[in-house]
Every structure is written in C-alpha cells, then in structure tokens.
Amino acid sequence: QKEVEQNSGPLSVPEGAIASLNCTYSDRGSQSFFWYRQYSGKSPELIMFIYSNGDKEDGRFTAQLNKASQYVSLLIRDSQPSDSATYLCAVLRWEYGNKLVFGAGTILRVKS
Amino acid sequence: DAGITQSPRHKVTETGTPVTLRCHQTENHRYMYWYRQDPGHGLRLIHYSYGVKDTDKGEVSDGYSVSRSKTEDFLLTLESATSSQTSVYFCAISETSGANNEQFFGPGTRLTVL
C-alpha cells in the first residue's frame, strides 16, 4: 500500500461545476496535509495546507480533513478551464524529519 | 517561483558521467530539498538540507550526493549517471520545518541519461 494514494484520473468536470479531489494516507501519525497544483511541464505550486479536522477555505478552494478516516479532499468551486492541471496531495510526517510524502497526483480536466 | 532558480534547465548526458545540478535561492530560507519526479511515482525526496553543511538522506538517495556550502546554494551530484536517473529534478525551499512546512519549488531540471 502506498503511503499517499490518489486516483490518477483524469477527472473531467464541466466549467462552473465543483471538482472534488480525494487523497488517502496510511500513517495515522501524519500531521499536516498539503495540496499542490502542477501544470504540464511546470513546477508544483502550493494551493493550501490543513492540519486540523474539518474544512479550510481559501477563495474557490476548500480543503477537508478527516483524520479518523485518513482522508483529505480538495474542492474547487466554479471550476474554470484554467484549473485543468495535476493536483498533488502531500503529507507531512514529523518523525521523518518533517519531510513531505507526495501522492502521484490526480489529473483534472475542466471542459468549457 | 519564489526566488528559486535551477541550472541547467535541460541536460543530456551519457551513462557513467558525473553530473551536478544547482539550486540557488534568494529567499534566505533555511531548508532546501531535492526531489525527482517520474510518471506514476509523484515527487520523491532525494536529499534535504537543514542548514549550511547540514544534510540528510531522503527516500531515494542511492547514487546521489549533495552539498551546501552557502545558505543560497544546494548542489545535487550524480556520481556516475545511469539511465534510471533520467527524470525531472526539482529543488524546493521552506522557511520552517513544523506543521506549516510550506515548500516552494524551483522550475525543474530535465535530465536525460543515454
């Protein structure tokens, strides 16, 4: 079992819809959770992070964390074609020197 | 890219040759990281640094070494390049190592080993 798992996709949503991206992790000792966006041929860009159970909102993005079920989600409201990218989930594990462990990413396609 | 540059941006080399990639930051961040990204594997940590001359191994460190003689520079060396090291290499920096360990990435180096 991979430490951080994401559905590779592609996830296709129509413009204006809500895109829901999911990530599960195996280690209950994981402390913080990060979402990155990566356009093809570019470097990852940090969207947001969360470390408390519940929701955290930043503009059109909402991160949701459920530590009991070991999953973290990213919702993108009013999806735009410019949101088409690969979304990477990353988990911070303190006992590993605060290193991030990344999932392989989910490809999102927003169709106009 | 948060004041991070990588050089070279593209490199083609032959098996068995040494290769050095450079990461340079202007943010004065303490922590620096080298990752490689391969299809189906996501980003994997090679080595990281928590200060000048302070480095440690990551998940996939075999065949790689690093050095950090100045805050702003973090070098990754492939001692004898192999075809399995063909990848895209990203450098990242962060200011802290706690729960809010926000890492910012450089533009990447695409390395091809023939």
Image (cartoon, rainbow, N blue to C red):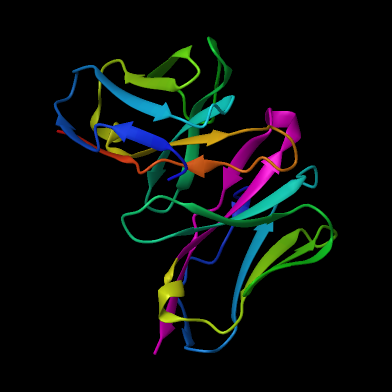
Q: Is residue B76 magenta?
A: no
Q: Is residue B64 above or below residue A101?
A: above
Q: Nearer the viewer, residue A88 or B97?
A: B97
Residue B52, by quadrant, is: top right
B78 left or right of A33 in image: left
Q: Examine the rendering and report whether any part of residue B62 can be seen.
A: no
A81 left or right of B50 in image: left
The residue that appears at 59% across and 24% down in the rendered structure is B30
In this rendering, the count of numbered labels is 0
Q: Is residue A96 magenta?
A: yes
A97 left or right of A85 in image: right
Q: Nearer the viewer, residue B6 or A14?
A: B6
Residue B85, by quadrant, is: top left
Q: Examine the rendering and report whether any part of residue A53 can be seen.
A: yes
Task: Residue B27: give x, y in percent of width and height.
Answer: 51, 32
Q: Main secondary structure of the magenta part?
A: strand
Q: Nearer the viewer, residue B100 or A98?
A: B100
The residue that appears at 66% across and 47% down in the rendered structure is A91
The residue that appears at 83% across and 55% down in the rendered structure is A52
Task: Residue A59: give x, y in percent of width and height.
Answer: 64, 72
Quarter of the image where the C terminus of chain A is located? bottom left
The residue that appears at 47% across and 44% down in the rendered structure is B43
Task: Residue B3: give x, y in percent of width and height.
Answer: 44, 38
B53 left or right of A99 in image: left
Q: Is residue B88 above or below residue B27?
A: below
Q: Which residues are magenta?
A: A86-112
Q: Nearer the viewer, residue B23 or B38?
A: B23
